[in-house]
């Protein structure tokens, strides 16, 4: 004799068609009520077993998809809440406004080696000039 009435599985659990009972979603996944399967938590979030939804990783941490916990960003890197990766945060450690690094052209004096500067010749050259 079968059950008189099917019941809906609660959020955080699932049941395949014809199953006699609900199964708990594993850590790193979640489900809404009545789900036939659990969904993987997206990168930047995590969950414990039986979760109805994933929790967002806090700022300063990150996670891959299906995470059971968030990992702390390594020294010198940072993230915002819900980020999947950490990025270098050198720009947050300055009091000056952050600007993108300027590209230098091949003839730019700041990057061009001083090949014609007399101060780069050996000291035996009498034409050495002082700065």
Image: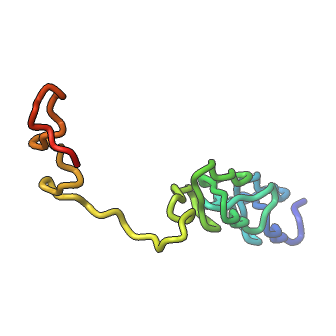
Residue 86 lies in quadrant? bottom right
At 45% from the left edge and 70% from the top edge, which residue is drawn? 98
Side of 66 relative to 4 (left or right): left
Pick the quarter of the image with the N terminus: bottom right
At 55% from the left edge and 56% from the top edge, which residue is drawn? 85
The one nearer the camera, 49 or 46, is: 46
Residue 65 lies in quadrant? bottom right
Q: Position of residue 77 (x, y in %)?
A: 57, 54
- Vertical side of 52 occupied by 111: above or below: above
The one nearer the camera, 128 or 29, is: 128
Toward the front, the furthest residue is 126
Q: Position of residue 58 (x, y in %)?
A: 70, 65
Q: Position of residue 17 (x, y in %)?
A: 71, 60
The one nearer the camera, 116 or 26, is: 116
Toward the top, the furthest residue is 124
Number of marks in the rendered image:
0
At 47% from the left edge and 74% from the top edge, which residue is drawn? 97
Q: Position of residue 2 (x, y in %)?
A: 87, 61
Side of 68 relative to 79 (left or right): right
The one nearer the camera, 92 or 24, is: 92
**Chosen colour scheme:** rainbow
- Vertical side of 53 occupied by 47: above or below: above
At 69% from the left edge and 66% from the top edge, which residue is drawn? 56
């Amino acid at each position: 004799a079968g059950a008189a009435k099917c019941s809906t599985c609660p959020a955080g659990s699932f049941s395949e068609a014809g199953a006699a009972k609900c199964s708990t979603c594993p850590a790193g996944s979640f489900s809404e009520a009545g789900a036939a399967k659990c969904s993987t938590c997206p990168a930047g979030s995590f969950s414990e077993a039986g979760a109805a939804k994933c929790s967002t990783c806090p700022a300063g941490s990150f996670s891959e998809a299906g995470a059971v916990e968030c990992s702390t960003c390594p020294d010198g890197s940072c993230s915002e809440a819900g980020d999947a990766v950490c990025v270098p945060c050198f720009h947050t450690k300055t009091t000056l406004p952050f600007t993108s690094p300027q590209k230098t052209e091949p003839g730019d004096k700041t990057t061009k080696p001083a090949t014609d500067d007399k101060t780069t010749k050996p000291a035996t050259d009498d034409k050495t000039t002082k700065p």
